[in-house]
Image (spheres, coloured by chain):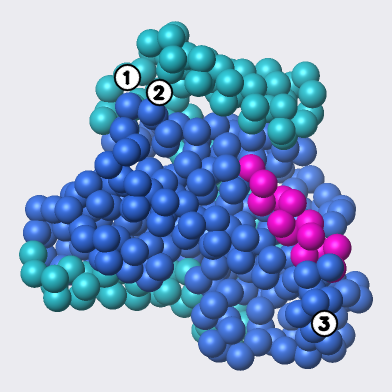
Chain colours: A blue, B cyan
Amino acid sequence: MQDPGSRSRWLSDPAAAMGVRDMVPAMVAMVAWGIVTGVAMVQSGLSTGQALGMTLMVYAGSAQLTSLPLFAAAAPLPIIWASALIVNLRFVLYGVAVKPFFQGFSWPRRLLFGFGNVDVLSAEFLRRFDPTRLKTASLVSEHPPGFLQSAIRYFKSAALTIWAVWTASSVVGILLAQWIPAAWGLDFIGTLALIALLLPMITGRAELLCVVVASMAAVLSAWMPLKLGILVAMLAGVIAAMWIPEAQTEPHHE
Amino acid sequence: MSDATIWLGLIGMMVMTLLTRSGIVVWPGPIHLPPRLQRALRFAPMAAIAAVILPSLIWSPQGDVIGLLDPRPLSAFACLLGWWISRQMSVCLTAGIVVYALGMLAL
């Protein structure tokens, strides 16, 4: 990448700083769920090393939690892998949405960008940076100037922040597993943080319709296994948002 | 399960994360979508986050119906109220956590 910013420059960059600031409610969610997931991994019988390995290698909380009863029941590996694939399917759509920003990078870099593209980051990033404002054919004719660079710096700093907070919280959960009782109901703090993250995003009719339709679809499809209900709700929300013409034309601030 | 089997399971799960999160991003060619669809896809993560919230206010992780006077729906309502009044994310989150903590202590 023709990134002129040295390390020190990107840390003091306003876009990078904004990326970290935007992650504050997400960090609260990551602390709560990281700890809960860490505790759950140890309590389901994984060794400390395996639990640490899972958190570092898999880096997908919902897939990790889904797999734990399967590991405990010694399910066949293809079943464990298939369920991880299904629970993670929603990430494919985030990948499609953010892909235009990363076209100019080498494949190992793109692999890393993709690995860091978790729900909370993708939600804030795509709200800030509209991929249709990029001229994807050539980075040289990038328009408006600086848009792509700001987006990349924002993404890097936000992705690193979320990864660090999630990993640190998981490690705390793994190491302190026997001192953190489930009765604390820590997991619900994560849900509250998601509410605090979502409400400021509802800035127009399209967002409101998307959130209402997705919520209702999620309740109706809650019976489905392997979080498939979330996939259904997501598709319903996206289709609903497409319906409102403002979503197409609304000018986007950075 | 043997240690080796568990590690093999973890490696396979990592492959699934990379496949779903990075697969499309690593794919060399550009993907041409109609702008209307490309814009609508920006709503995908927001919709997924919304989809987690409401069901977790109705059912516990074990699948029992929660009921309206539980700390969970009450604190979610406090979040909503905090946001409504202040338009500050921090007020919204603090209101929710305080009501939830008080509710859990009271039970």
Residue type highlighted by circle 1: Val
Q: Is circle 3 on the same chain as circle 1? A: no
Question: Mark on residue B95?
Answer: none
Q: Are marks 1 and 2 on the same chain?
A: yes
Q: Is residue A156 visible?
A: yes
- Give the position of the N terminus of chain A as an image quadrant: bottom right
> Residue placed farthest to the right in the image?
A145
Per the image, the residue denoted by label 2 is: B58
Residue at which label 1 appears: B65
The CA span between labels 3 and 2 is 48 Å
The residue at the point 34 percent across, 64 percent down is: A52
Say what secondary structure mark 1 lies in. Answer: loop
Identity of the amino acid at label 3? Gly
Say which quarter of the image contains residue B10.
bottom left
- Mark 3 vs mark 2, foreground winner is 3
Marks 3 and 2: same chain? no
Please state if B9 lies on the left or on the right of A111 as rendered: left
Q: Earlier in the sequence, mark 1 or mark 2?
A: 2
Within 10 Å of disc 3 (Cα), the crowding (few <14, some 14-19, many 20+) is: few
Question: Is mark 1 in CB contact (under 8 Å) with mark 2?
Answer: yes
